[in-house]
Amino acid sequence: MAETLILSTATDKASRYQVLVPQIEALTTGEPDLIANLANIAAALKQTMNFFWVGFYLVKKDALVLGPFQGPIACTRIVKGRGVCGASWKEKKVIIVPNVDEFPGHIACSSDSKSEIVLPAFKNDEVTLVLDVDSDKLNDFDETDALYLKQVMTLIERLS
Ligand code: SME
């Protein structure tokens, strides 16, 4: 497909996700390279949702290693169980953190990050990577983000 992203002008995030998700499917269909696809997905999420930081950490042996992202520089390695990303990997679940200062062991890559959502992707019931999204506002993520970002993770799972 053409490398053009149609951005919704809607102010509510559900509408913006609804315009985005089918485009992510089209953008990644036919491209076999996972890193290329993750790079475009991070860019599309940043452009559409204007997230402070959005990116991927890939499971490599006993650590999560930084993958494609958009935003300020970030820590490169996270061990299993550490931080929100490591907890999502270990517990195999979506984690929404309304206030990162109240999450035990939160890894502060940026002091501007205030709230966060992390979602795992699976292959054969094992986590292969996580999507991490940070906001510079408190309490910025909810079940709407979880719903649509899970659809993005399902699209990613079909790629790997
Ligand atoms: N805050 C994350 C670390 C990654 S950065 O936010 C990009 C965590 O606690 O796992």
Image: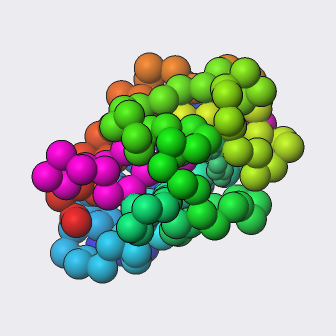
Q: Is residue 125 magenta?
A: yes
Q: Where is residue 19 in the image (x, y as percent from the top left)?
A: 39, 42
In the displayed image of the protein, which residue is found farthest to the right? 111
> In the image, what residue occupies the spot 61% across and 41% down?
83
Question: x and y percent of residue 141 in the render?
Answer: 57, 26
Q: Can residue 49 be seen in this view?
A: no
Is residue 20 positioned above or below 38 on the image?
Answer: above
On the question of residue 100 being in view, the answer is yes
Magenta residue span: 119-136
Which residue appears at 40% of the width and 75% of the height? 35
- Number of residue marks: 0
Q: Is residue 77 left or right of residue 148?
A: right
**Quadrant in the rendering for residue 59:** bottom left
Q: Where is residue 125 in the image (x, y as percent from the top left)?
A: 18, 46
The x, y position of residue 88, in whole percent, is 44, 38
Identity of the residue drawn at 70% across and 45% down? 107
Q: Which of 48 and 38 is in front in this view?
A: 38
Assign the N terminus to one quadrant of the image: bottom left
Q: How was this image coloured? A: rainbow
Q: Main secondary structure of the magenta part?
A: strand
Residue shown at 63%/66% (left/top)?
Answer: 76
Judge left or right: residue 25 versus residue 134.
left
Question: Quadrant location of residue 137?
Answer: top right
